[in-house]
Image (tube, grey):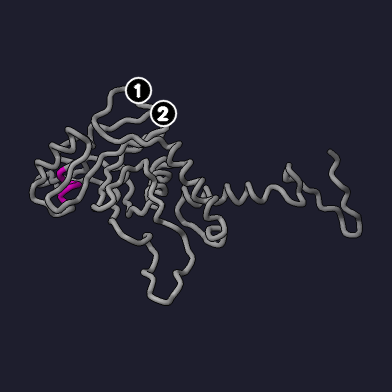
């Protein structure tokens, strides 16, 4: 998986989204079977709820078990509070941009068809015109472009979120919930790497000093203090 895509996926997941990275869009190719049109960098869904994602509903007389807080939705995402949010994300490691593949009506129809809505043409037209559309079933579909630097060329209507913003959010989350997170192991490449960086940062001090270097002497020989 692309490093930038992994970062965005971790960012969306911590905001309560179910994600699919590098989602392939296929089309019929007649007798030859199917052909690949493009890949959607990130496809994400978030369902509105009155309780933090992944937390059990508290019962009367019982205290809520302490765990991770998924209720603090990043305002920068602009997610609708009372509707299912579907994000079609384009991720660039450099300048923000949206590939022509994502703006292809055929691609958008294929993505939106996963929702089972019949009025796909109207939704696709609205999405291309404004960057946001609502399906007949009430699902909000949005185009979001992620990148490290501002766009060099004009981009179609969409929301732009910098990778720096996503990184800052992730780092803040790790430090806020460190007492819980430090006991866990993560398979997600981006979030797992951030956890490793935070462990390294916190473990660099202590008896090894600020430089994080120590020489262990032979048995019986006293350890000499480090000269400043």
Q: Which residue is mark 2?
A: 149
Q: Which mark is residue 103?
A: none
Q: Label 2 crowding class (10 Å Cα cut-off): few <14, some 14-19, many 20+? A: some
Residue that lies at the very extreme toward the bottom in this rendered image: 61
Q: Which residue is mark 1?
A: 152
Q: Residue at x 29, y 51 (%)?
A: 81
Residue that lies at the very extreme toward the front in this rendered image: 61
Asked which secondary structure carries label 1, the reply is loop
Q: Is residue 216 magenta?
A: no
List x then y, in percent, for residue 102: 23, 37
Q: Is residue 99 left or right of residue 127?
A: right
Residue 37, quarter of the rendered image: top left
Magenta-tinted stretch: 109-113
Between 222 and 225, the one nearer to me in the picture: 225
Circles 2 and 1, Cβ within 8 Å, touching? The answer is yes
Above or below 169: residue 61: below
Q: Quadrant of the C terminus?
A: top right
Between 179 and 29, the one nearer to me in the picture: 179
Above or below 30: residue 116: below
List x then y, in percent, for residue 149: 41, 28
């Amino acid at each position: 998986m692309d490093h930038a895509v992994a970062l965005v996926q971790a960012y969306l997941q911590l905001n309560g989204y179910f994600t699919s990275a590098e989602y392939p869009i296929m089309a019929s190719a007649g007798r030859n079977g199917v052909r690949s049109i493009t890949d959607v960098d990130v496809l994400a869904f978030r369902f509105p709820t009155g309780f933090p994602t992944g937390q059990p509903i508290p019962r009367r007389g019982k205290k809520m078990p302490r765990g991770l807080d998924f209720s603090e939705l990043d305002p920068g995402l602009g997610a609708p509070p009372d509707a299912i949010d579907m994000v079609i994300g384009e991720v660039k490691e450099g300048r923000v941009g949206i590939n022509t593949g994502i703006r292809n009506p055929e691609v958008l129809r294929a993505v939106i068809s996963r929702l089972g809505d019949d009025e796909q043409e109207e939704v696709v037209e609205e999405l291309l015109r404004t960057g946001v559309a609502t399906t007949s079933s009430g699902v909000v579909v949005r185009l979001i472009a992620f990148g490290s630097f501002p766009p060099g060329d004009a981009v179609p209507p969409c929301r732009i979120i910098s990778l720096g913003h996503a990184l800052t959010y992730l780092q803040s989350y790790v430090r806020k919930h460190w007492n819980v997170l430090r006991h866990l192991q993560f398979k997600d490449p981006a979030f797992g790497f951030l956890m490793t960086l935070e462990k390294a940062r916190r473990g660099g001090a202590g008896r090894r000093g600020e430089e994080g270097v120590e020489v262990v002497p032979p048995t019986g020989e006293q350890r000499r203090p480090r000269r400043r």
